[in-house]
Image (tube, coloured by chain):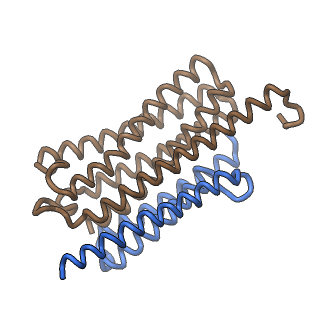
Amino acid sequence: MSVAHMSEHEREEAETREQRALGFWLYLMGDAVIFALLFATYAIMIPGTAGGPTGKDLFDLNNAALETVLLLVSSTTFGFASLSVRTGNRSAVIGWLAVTFLLGAGFVFLEVREFAGMIAKGAGPDRSGFLSAFFTLVGTHGVHVTMGLLWILILSAQVMLKGLTAPVASRLYRLGLFWHFLDIAWVGIFSIVYLPGLL
Amino acid sequence: MEQHGLRNYLIGFVLAVVLSAIPFWLVATHALPPQRTLLIIGIAAVLQVLVHLRFFLHLNFTTTPKENLLALVFTALLIFIMVGGSFWIMFDLHQRMMT
């Protein structure tokens, strides 16, 4: 629908949606600053192992690679969900959201398993400054992904119950921003934490 | 699904796979000396972030609202000051403590 044919009410609604998209974008920028500072803290704390295990002793390249694949594929499948929103294909949206959810859940599972294994080996966040920084950085990302999973469930329910109405589509758009942003943060994590740690 | 949009996501996906596979492969095989591998990890990461911004978040200079780009540039500046400043202080302190 072109702007000229919109009623006053529709124009106001479109404007509200744009404002919300900008507001959410500003939130993501704030989140980017948080992650950047956690990255800086981590980089500074790398030598602070207090005689305990280093990244080389603890990290597993295959696990990090698998997590990378899961998150990257989930970012792409969320893209397919967004495209299905545009064409108004309700069942395709739900299907792609379900695939995205499963991939994201797989990522969280691998991360929780890695954390549990480290803690069982006595390499928990209380072992050294290095490990405190590691768990804070990677854990913050993991909590974000978990929140994203909850958000996917809630919006899937909304798509099922309400259909692809303008407000639901606008929420899906912001969830998409959030989900793609988390994949960018993960690129930082494997490039700063796992790969240099295993070098 | 829309053809154009679909192509965009697939291009982004393939580029991201390549830009992830290269650094992972280098670390797995130790094909290059560590210093050079680190450099390539850094370059691949920066390129991959740009790929994500362009193909997944659809940022560009024509349709993206100016406020969004401005916020992004401002955030990059903040990150540069805060992260750069932290490194400067901490490494300087580290050197003073050693000598």
Task: Report which colour depicts chain A.
Answer: brown
Farthest residue, direction right: A4
**Location of residue A53 in the rendering, given as x and y in whole percent from the top left corner:** 14, 59
Q: Say left or right for A41 vs A35.
A: left
Residue closest to the eye, B91 or B15: B91
Q: Residue at x 23, y 78 (%)?
A: B96
The answer to which quarter of the image holds residue A41 is bottom left
- Residue A192 as seen in the image, left or right of residue B63: left
Relative to A142, say whether A47 is above or below. Answer: below
Colour that chain B carries in the picture: blue
Q: Nearer the viewer, residue A189 or A100?
A: A189
A129 lies left or right of B70: left
> Residue A127 placed where, x, y %?
14, 52
Rendered-image quadrant of the C terminus of chain A? bottom left
Q: Quadrant of residue B89?
A: bottom left
Residue visible at 18% across and 82% down? B99
Question: For residue B86, what is the image quadrant?
Answer: bottom left
Residue at 70 percent across and 50 percent down: it is B65
The single residue placed furthest to the bottom in the displayed view is B99
In which quadrant will I find the N terminus of chain A? top right
Give the number of marks. 0
Residue A25: give x, y in percent of width and height. Answer: 58, 46
Rendered position, A71 above or below A1? below
Q: Which x, y percent locates residue A77?
A: 53, 41
